[in-house]
Amino acid sequence: MLTEMTGAATEGRGRLLGKSAVITGAAFGIGRATAVLFAREGARLVVTDIQGEPLLALAEELRHSGAQVETVVGDVSVQNDAERMIRAAVDRFGRLDVLVANAGIIPLGDVQEVTATDWDNVMAIDGRGMFLTCRFAIEAMLPTGGGAIVCLSSISGLAGQKRQAAYGPAKFIATGLTKHLAVEWADRGIRVNAVAPGTIRTERVERLPEEPGGSEYLAAVERMHPMGRIGEPAEVASAIVFLASDDASFITGAVLPVDGGYLAQ
Ligand SMILES: NC(=O)c1ccc[n+]([C@@H]2O[C@H](COP(=O)([O-])OP(=O)(O)OC[C@H]3O[C@@H](n4cnc5c(N)ncnc54)[C@H](O)[C@@H]3O)[C@@H](O)[C@H]2O)c1
């Protein structure tokens, strides 16, 4: 099961050996694939999500493979919950080395279709939630000399796309937060980078055909990726591991496309 989920990923090389990491939105999709790969690379994990049952199931799976795993069920947009997620790593592992700020929702629609509520929700979770978890993570990293944060931006956080009138601007926040925090904390040993995935075959994307116009949208988006396919969660997880690891020791403020060439056009 774990091997299937990480796709092309090979045996762990210990690139995150002993590092204490928090991953938000770990129950499904990119967050889940990242948790699996982090465990394989030797990280000690706090996996967090708003959905308790699938999160606990993931944690059980990871423990069976030998990983040290803590869980926190909570909502990243709620200040106390965000703080609990970070504190869990310090309480259990004595430090925080890595945050993957991944939790998010993806409401699709043009500016006539999405509502003010859609806007508020995506800004609360993808925007405020990322701000809060980064804020508490930086506070936790400072006493031990630094760490690495990887935020989930998107191709929609670097370029315009159709039907992303609320989601796209929220991902521009991820890009902006990454660059500003990178500069703000570079001299204190904290690196802040982002990945900008193209369309990735996660649970969210697999539900698209259930939405009006969803199938057509997905087919069109697939054609827009020069590689002629959408990506797999494990392909994003690999890039996140790199940015979180010491292999990326001189990289901060970068927004790395993981998009099959989408942004190169
Ligand atoms: N799938 C894509 O095509 C794609 C592309 C670019 C960027 N991204 C970004 O990657 C991240 C993950 O997306 P995904 O496709 O894996 O989505 P997903 O829906 O498959 O998984 C998102 C996870 O976040 C959790 N979550 C949602 N709201 C939360 C909250 N308030 N607090 C805590 N957890 C919450 C969900 O329960 C779920 O487990 C998002 O930030 C998204 O914007 C996804």
Image (tube, helix red, strand yellow):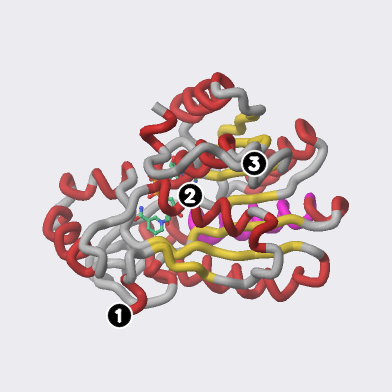
Q: Is residue 158 above or below residue 30?
A: below
**Which secondary structure dominates the residues rendered in magenta?**
helix
Q: Amino acid at mark 3?
A: Gly
Which residue position holds label 1?
A: 265
Q: Amino acid at mark 1?
A: Gln
Q: Secondary structure at mark 3?
A: loop
Q: Is residue 216 above or below residue 11?
A: below
> Does 215 lie within the magenta span?
no
Which residue position holds label 3?
A: 14
Q: Which residues are magenta?
A: 124-140
- Comparing marks 3 and 2, which lies closer to the viewer? 3
What percent of the width, then of the height, locates residue 239? 50, 56
What percent of the width, then of the height, locates residue 183? 71, 75
Tags 2 and 1 touching, CB below 8 Å = no
Q: Distance of mark 1 from mark 3, alpha carbons?
A: 35 Å
Q: Residue at x 66, y 45 (%)?
A: 16
Q: Distance of mark 3 from mark 2, alpha carbons?
A: 15 Å
Which residue position holds label 2?
A: 237
- Report crowding for label 1: few under 14, some 14 to 19, many 20 or more residues within 10 A (C-alpha): few
Of mark 2 and mark 1, the one earlier in the sequence is: 2
Q: Is residue 180 above or below residue 249?
A: below
